[in-house]
Amino acid sequence: MVTKTFIIQNPTGLHARPATSFVQKASSFPCEVNLIKGEKKVNGKSIMGVMSLAAGKGDELTLEVAGEREQEALEELGSVLEKVHE
């Protein structure tokens, strides 16, 4: 398992469009993907889970990835979280 913390850079946060991009990218990997904000941990392949975090600009999210291709998934999904505009 690999984990890394990211700061949301998008001015509107992880709203519908970037959340959808994240879930689509996460679903393309065969590993388990979780997002953690504070005490809340959600499945990164679930749009409802990701949206329920209500992550805004400046929020810290920890990305937790376990399984096949986990390092590649961590890097690519981290890029989605750090994008300024979507």
Image (spheres, rainbow, N blue to C red):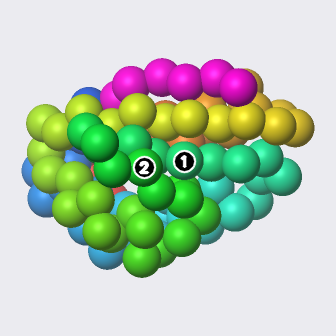
Q: Magenta includes 23?
A: no
Res 81 seen here: no
Instruction: Give the residue at x 75% y 59%.
Output: 28
Extreme residue in the front direction: 39
Which percent across, then down, holds residue 82? 35, 37
Q: Mark 1 points at which residue?
A: 34
Q: Is residue 27 left or right of residue 40?
A: right
Res 26 seen here: yes
Instruction: Give the residue at x 42% y 49%.
Output: 41
Which percent across, then down, holds residue 15? 25, 67
Q: Give the range drawn in magenta.
A: 1-6
Label 1 is placed on what type of residue? Answer: Asn
Quarter of the view holding residue 2:
top right
Q: Main secondary structure of the magenta part?
A: strand
Label 2 is placed on what type of residue? Answer: Lys
Q: In this view, does 11 lie to the left or right of 84?
A: left
Quadrant housing the C terminus: bottom left
Q: In this view, does 22 lie to the left or right of 69?
A: left
Residue 41 badge: 2
Residue 44 badge: none
Which percent across, then down, holds residue 22? 50, 58
- Evaluate if marks 1 and 2 touch, with contact meaning CB atoms under 8 Å apart: yes
* Residue in the foreground of this view, choosing between 6 and 12: 6
Q: Is residue 35 above or below residue 52?
A: above
Tag 2, which secondary structure?
A: strand
Instruction: Give the residue at x 40% y 33%.
Output: 62
